[in-house]
Image (spheres, rainbow, N blue to C red):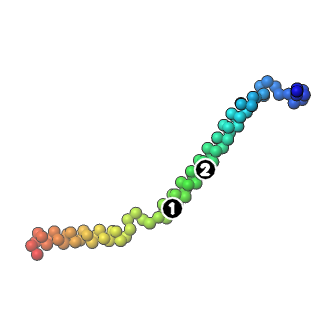
Amino acid sequence: MERSSMTRLSPDQEHSTGELVKMMSEQVSTIVGAALLAAAGGAALVGKQRLQRATPPVPAEAVASVKADVEEIKERTHHERTGI
């Protein structure tokens, strides 16, 4: 079966089925890659926002507890030096 002269492709426009599949798979992989990058970027932004809203790294209770411990140690060392 031969094509009519109006639908005939020039030799540089003809592609085998394998070449077409390869070109389509490259396009699909590019689209999928772009979608994955977009999803990763979105996840990074959500994670950044959650970190900004998180509790501070040094809670006030922990700071107060450490200060109390330091005072206790100072008092004990002072008492040991003075013998009181």
Residue type at mark 2: give it: Ala
In the image: residue 23, left or right of residue 49: right
The one nearer the camera, 26 or 67, is: 26
Q: Quadrant of residue 82?
A: bottom left
Image quarter hosting the N terminus: top right
Residue lying farthest to the front in this orientation: 1
Q: CA distance from mark 1 to mark 2?
A: 19 Å
Residue type at mark 1: give it: Arg
Q: Position of residue 16 (x, y in %)?
A: 75, 28
Q: Are marks 1 and 2 in contact (CB under 8 Å)?
A: no
In the image: residue 64, left or right of residue 37: left
Q: Residue at x 77, y 25 (%)?
A: 12
Q: Residue at x 51, y 57 (%)?
A: 48
Q: Which residue is mark 1?
A: 50
- Tag 2: Cα neighbours inside 10 Å, few (<14), some, or many (≥20)? few
Q: Residue at x 60, y 48 (%)?
A: 36
Q: Is residue 50 above or below residue 25?
A: below
Q: Residue at x 24, y 68 (%)?
A: 70
The one nearer the camera, 7 or 46, is: 7
In the image: residue 80, left or right of residue 52: left
Q: Quadrant of residue 69?
A: bottom left
Q: Position of residue 67 (x, y in %)?
A: 28, 70
Q: Is residue 24 above or below residue 81?
A: above
Q: Which residue is mark 2?
A: 38
